[in-house]
């Protein structure tokens, strides 16, 4: 198979390239590229560090970029240059995350302070979850809990990119040292069901990459659990009688870092037909064991299920 014209690419299986089209901003961020390098204005180059010589233009949705010093390339080449990967490594990593990263380009250049201000305002417009509100109804029906952790709040009318406003569940994501990272949004109906929108679950734009962050659904203790979804984490906490935090997706689960003081970790993984959840769980386990943690993995027996689906 010839290289892709204009990109100097090596052989690439079509499925990986096709699935990555239109998803490169999210893929690159998930694989450790700072979002400030994914806007469409000239600025510093993430490869050589030169000032005002680089631009990410994402032509045809293929993650293309140009630097007057480093040259040009697509998303694969950017990952190779930044991480020192060969092409096979870059393609493997892209294939791992492409299907779980939503499509969409960076549409607006925003400063870190702009993003922080938006996060503060959105959290400030929310309120604690109370019995009978849409978030309480959603979590009670989905997981069976009666008390909702304080890092989950209810926003009565949150704007969606589709247009209009909806009730929403907000979940505060924090880094291992406790500093805020972003807000995870789940759009709902007034009666506590998932809203009919193109993307029910979304992150707010974060000033820094979310690697190592999680939603804290209980106090951090010597023994702490981690899962992908918020609902999954809450269900796992009930089942295994240990606080379980939510990384929110498989990519961030694999990148999660426990806070200081944790010695033992329960990984409540998903049983995905694609093995995405299992792969993330075991990759995290291997890293944590290497770092000296005692690790236990629990995965539901039924394919296609997570712990929120498995019941008590």
Image (tube, grey):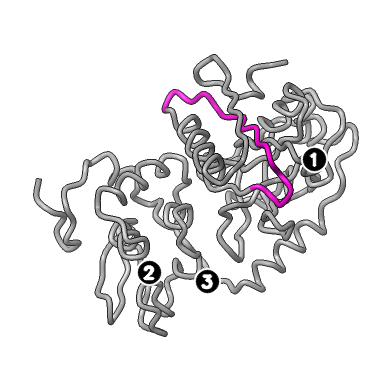
Above or below residue 43? Residue 165 is above
Among all residues in the image, which is located at the extreme front?
A: 292
Marks 3 and 2, how far apart in space? 12 Å
Q: Which residue is mark 3?
A: 109
Number of the label disc, if any, that sits on residue 204: none
User: Percent position (x, y) of residue 73?
Assistant: 26, 65
Comparing 229 with 265, the one in front is 265
Q: Earlier in the sequence, mark 3 or mark 2?
A: 2
Q: CA distance from mark 1 to mark 2?
A: 40 Å
Q: Is 9 situated left or right of 25 in this image?
A: left
Name the residue located 70 percent from the left edge and 46 percent from the top edge: 215
At horizontal 50% and vertical 64% (from top left) the residue drawn is: 35
The image shows residue 44, relative to residue 118, as above or below, that is below
Whole-percent x and y of residue 170?
73, 47
Instruction: Provide the residue designation for mark 2.
Output: 56
Tag 1 residue: 218
Q: Is residue 222 above or below residue 114?
A: above
Task: Please identify the quarter of the rendering in which residue 275 is found.
Answer: top left
The 10 Å Cα crowd at callout 2, few under 14, some 14 to 19, many 20 or more, is: many
Residue 111 percent coordinates (x, y): 59, 74
Q: Quadrant of the C terminus?
A: top right
Residue at 24% x, 74% y is 71
Predominant SS along the magenta part: loop
203 within the magenta span: no
- Neighbour tally class for label 3: few under 14, some 14-19, many 20 plus, Cα within 10 Å: some
The answer to the question of whether label 3 and label 2 lie on touching residues, with beta carbons closer than 8 A, is: no
* Nearest the eye: 198 or 169: 169
Q: Secondary structure at mark 1?
A: loop
Q: Which residues fall within the magenta stretch?
A: 258-274
């Amino acid at each position: 198979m010839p290289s892709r014209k204009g990109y100097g690419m090596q052989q690439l299986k079509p499925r990986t390239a096709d699935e990555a089209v239109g998803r490169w901003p999210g893929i690159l961020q998930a694989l450790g590229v700072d979002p400030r390098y994914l806007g469409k204005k000239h600025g510093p180059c993430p490869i050589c560090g030169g000032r005002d010589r680089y631009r990410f233009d994402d032509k045809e949705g293929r993650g293309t970029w140009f630097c007057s010093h480093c040259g040009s390339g697509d998303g694969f080449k950017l990952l190779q240059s930044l991480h020192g990967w060969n092409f096979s490594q870059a393609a493997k990593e892209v294939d791992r995350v492409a299907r779980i990263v939503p499509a969409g380009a960076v549409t607006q250049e925003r400063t870190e302070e702009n993003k922080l201000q938006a996060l503060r305002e959105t959290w400030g417009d929310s309120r604690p979850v109370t019995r009978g509100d849409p978030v309480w109804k959603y979590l009670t029906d989905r997981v069976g809990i009666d008390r909702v952790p304080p890092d989950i709040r209810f926003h009565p009318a949150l704007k969606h990119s589709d247009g209009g406003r909806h009730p929403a569940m907000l979940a505060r994501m924090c880094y291992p040292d406790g500093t805020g990272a972003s807000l995870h949004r789940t759009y709902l109906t007034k009666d506590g069901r998932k809203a009919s929108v193109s993307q029910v679950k979304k992150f707010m734009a974060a000033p820094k990459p979310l690697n190592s962050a999680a939603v804290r659904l209980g106090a951090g203790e010597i023994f702490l659990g981690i899962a992908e979804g918020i609902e999954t984490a809450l269900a796992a906490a009930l089942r295994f009688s240990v606080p379980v935090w939510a990384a929110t997706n498989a990519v961030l689960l694999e990148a999660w870092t426990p806070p200081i003081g944790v010695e033992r970790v329960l990984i409540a993984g998903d049983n995905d037909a694609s093995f995405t959840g299992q792969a993330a769980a075991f990759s995290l386990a291997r890293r944590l064991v290497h770092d000296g943690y005692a690790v236990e993995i629990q995965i539901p027996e039924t394919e296609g299920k997570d712990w929120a689906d498995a019941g008590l």
